[in-house]
Image (spheres, helix red, strand yellow):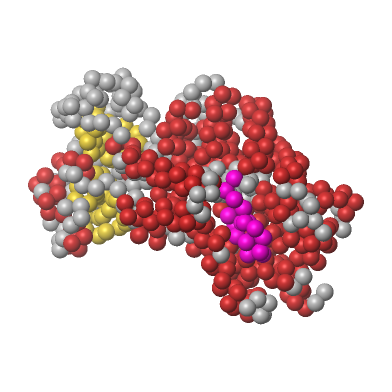
Amino acid sequence: MTWQQAAVFAGLAVLVVELVRGRRAPATVFAAVGFGFVVLDFVGVHKAMTHFTNPGLVTVVVLLLLSTVLDRSHLLETVAERLARGPYRAVLAKLYVSAGLYSAFLNNTAVVASLIGPLRKLRTHAASRLLLPMCFAATLGGTLTLVGTSTNLLVNSLMIGQGMPGLHIFDLFPVGILIMIACGVTMVLLYPWLLKAQPPAEESASDYFLEATVRPDSPLVGKTVEGAGLRNLAHLYLAEIVRDGFTIAPVQPDRMLRAGDLLVFTGDLTRLDLLTRFEGLETHGQRYELPLDNLVEVVVAANSTLARRTLKEVDFRAQFDAAVIAVRRGSERLRGPIANVPLEVGDTLVLVVGHEFERRNNLQRNFVIVSKRQVQKFTDPRKGLLAVAGFVGAIVLAALGVVDFLKALLVLLAAFLVTGLAKPADLRRNMPYAIILIIASSLVISDVMVSTGAAVLLARFLLSGVESFGPYGALALILVSTWILTELMTNNAAAALAFPVALGVAQSTGLEPQPFVMAVLYGASCSFVTPYGYQTNLMIMSPGRYTMADFARAGLPIALVFQVVALVAVPVFFPFR
């Protein structure tokens, strides 16, 4: 072993230990090791910097930026509400197929985040019996296409960096669909017994209250609260109705709605878009024709002229080019219409603001601006449909070979910016700097492992115990090793570590590298046994009240089926020779 190889193994040991400990961000660890290899002159500075313009890396960045626009569509939530009808096995199958297909094209995290709310509110089935299979379906759906998950794009970047031909968008589909079908059948057969109904997790009550008025021309007039669809909104709860100066609380499902009713909701204010779906239900922002996309949270300052005065008295709309949609005063429960509540110093207000708001010279005197929030979904559903249609169009054109995939995505991103569906500030805020560092540093580390011979040396050591099993033994070694790594650390980190080893195995056995690289790609998506390998697993732990034992019990059968199908199918579609 040369000193260069020893230094590479030392760097890899530091990398693995720090990733497993989890005390430092993966991007920091990867960047530090990659930088160390550059300092030791294992790779030139110029070559290292070129990895930041790797086409695969650029594709990852553009896709993640596009996902910030696609995430604002209502499509997933609407579908979830319709899927949750019927017996448990039927709901499970429909949810599995839908979540898997969506996550084949959309960001897995966005799919899970969009579905958690609607599934938690279901009365027909406990959330604990649906959230985990939905999360697993989203992970499995990511194996269907190149854009299904950032891990696929990371591996594609590493392949291009090593001079291998890049993957096309549907190259992963044959193996991915077999895995998804086998795992789906396993879920439908076993999960009715493996997943128990847990009482819903307690939600912290919101101190904010949001108002909307039923206009006289609204089709809601004459309907009951439940009949109007206001009873089971995923993120907002109808707390009371103010009618003719009287407060009706709690609100019963059979309460009839009347023209002029003031409906008071509590919950997530950034889901203001849920109320804009109801024709004739008018929030304060709509009444004053203010844009609802962005909210500003402010605190009434000590020397404010608003103290002890109501919004009507100060003509708030004209004075600040803004409308108050919610008020919070510590733990005190404020009742009645917001416009009639005398404000106090220290009150927190949530505003929808006009274009002139920031230019008003009375802001500093009256407010302390706390934060700016973006409404999570488009308040105009047509914008969401337009964004999804544009993305589907780009995918189809790229799949047919009409246009280069990356070029199609860049054109789409430019179109989103021109039409206002995306804003430069949003893109800057959502720039995936951590992913950029991980992928670029992974490319450097992979280069060094291959060029110094460390990858081959490590591969020969690992192969020493499976030589008698031939190519399938080597493939199983890569699959299982990547699976174990992805349960211990992030899937991107696992793929980045396993990739050069896969190349070393191919070189040592004299076989084509592609099946071993595909084993890394699929193995890095096999994160089911612990909640720590993938962020979506963590996202559902609290809402579903899951424990480590729940993941082990429900995830192990899926992981084993996944591994067996991948081991058999990968060599069929990506031959050894």
- Is residue 168 rendered magenta in the image? yes
What residue appears at the point 68 percent right and 77 percent down from the top-left corner?
A: 42
What residue appears at the point 69 percent right and 51 percent down from the top-left corner?
A: 518
Frontmost residue, 442 versus 383: 383
Residue 113 seen in this snapshot: no
The percent position of residue 433, horizontal first and vertical second, equals: 49, 63
The percent position of residue 429, horizontal first and vertical second, equals: 40, 59
The percent position of residue 129, horizontal first and vertical second, equals: 57, 31
Frontmost residue, 492 versus 361: 492
Q: Is residue 549 left or right of residue 82?
A: right
Instruction: Indicate whether 313 appears above or below 25.
Output: above
Frontmost residue, 488 versus 376: 376
Instruction: Identify the image quadrant of residue 254.
Output: top left
What residue appears at the point 22 percent right and 51 percent down from the top-left corner?
A: 353
Instruction: Identify the image quadrant of residue 372.
Output: bottom left
Instruction: Identify the image quadrant of residue 177.
Output: top right
Instruction: Indicate whether 59 appears above or below 227.
Output: below
The percent position of residue 235, horizontal first and vertical second, equals: 38, 38
Q: Is residue 511 left or right of residue 377?
A: right
